[in-house]
Amino acid sequence: MADYYQILGVDKNATQEEVKKAYRKLAHKFHPDKNPGDKSAETKFKEINNAYEVIGDPKKRNDYNRFGANTNQYQQYAQGRGAGAGGFGGFEGVDFNFGQGGQGGFGDINDVFESFFGAGFNGGARQSSNFSQQKGVDIEMKIDLTLEEAAKGVKKKFNYKHNIKCEHCEGKGHEPDSSVKTCNTCHGKGRVYQRVETIFGTIQQETQCPECEGVGKLYDKKCNVCTGKGFNKANDNIEIDIPVGVDTGDKIRVNGKGEAGYKNSNPGDLYLIVNILKHNHLSRDNQDINSSIEVNYFDFLLGTQVDVYTVWGEVEIKIPAGTSPDKKLRLKNQGMPSLNNSRNKGDHYLQLIPMMPKKLTKKQIKSLEKLKAEIE
């Protein structure tokens, strides 16, 4: 079986937009209406549609990149999914659940068919949804936060460039004064059917009409601003409330702020990937905070008070007389708040580091020896 990327003439690393552009160009070139009676063009048109049905969809494209069009590879994948029903050679790992009504349990196997042959697979059982809906792509952006910002929460303003709905045509893709007619290729249904030979036999595949792109209608004037896409690249400004307690790797989802969808389809989402910046004095261990402070050796003996920096500001703590030099003090509820409950905070652990005098005078040495003798 020919490689789908070769059929569309794109590289394996091509973006979805590049794949779509290549498909539309080839579909227009080999459309049966433009090549009446040309069987080779008709065959090529079917190949193009088959290829785009798979690599035009990110999920199916991912499956195709993993397994290709190789039947044996898919069977090995299926066998690894768990015990299945007997009696189906080569599909021991696929779970066939036969429910009431004869076909009620075919949801799972239909999903298997759809993952390989497109959402338009029709074994006489399913009606497809609106093919023209092409949700916008999600966007991921890294957001740097200080430890203090993560502890207290913060408002962050962002300026980023992405596809937003075209204001001129309101995302419709055509001029307001365009005349409209029913698509002759699909007769207004937005879908076309073709017979496909598969490992399961001959099936009827339902695909989006390449002429009207699943709308069922044709407009004579594309939007002059967005050239028919329904969106334009533009700068966007947003302000986001960052919740307390976030940590590196956490994702903050902003609904509808991804790439605009094709011709008024739903937009994608924006995902902010949290990165907590390294702190000069503090380190984080889940909800707990760790730090250290140097303390004069005599202060361990006599006791003292020191100022300690925490994510909530400075606090004064008492070091009792006779404290062990390797002591780690616990500052209760001075750590990071829980992401699920801001009132639930971790602790701050302070490691005391003894600071020994580097040089002593003879007088100081005699004083210490006298003190030692008295203590003993």
Image: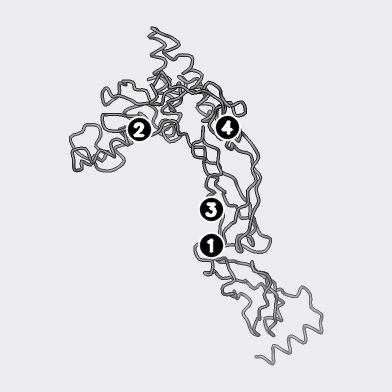
Residue type, numbered disc 4: Cys
Residue 286 numbered tag: 1
Question: Which of the colour schemes (rainbow, by chain, secondary structure, one colour) is used?
Answer: one colour
- Given this view, does label 4 or label 2 mark the residue nearer the observer? 4
Q: Which residue does the numbered mark 4 point to in the structure image?
A: 169
Q: Taking 176 as reference, is 277 above or below it?
A: below
Residue 95 numbered tag: none
- Between residue 44 and residue 299, name the one nearer to us: 44
Mark closer to the chain start, 3 or 1: 3
Residue type, numbered disc 3: Asp
Graded by Cα atoms within 10 Å as few (under 14), some (14 to 19) or many (20 or more), the crowding at tag 1 reads some
Q: Which residue does the numbered mark 3 point to in the structure image?
A: 250
Q: Taking 277 as reference, is 21 above or below it?
A: above
Rounded to the nearest angstrom, the CA distance separating label 4 from label 2 is 27 Å
Rounded to the nearest angstrom, the CA distance separating label 4 from label 1 is 49 Å
Mark closer to the chain start, 4 or 2: 2
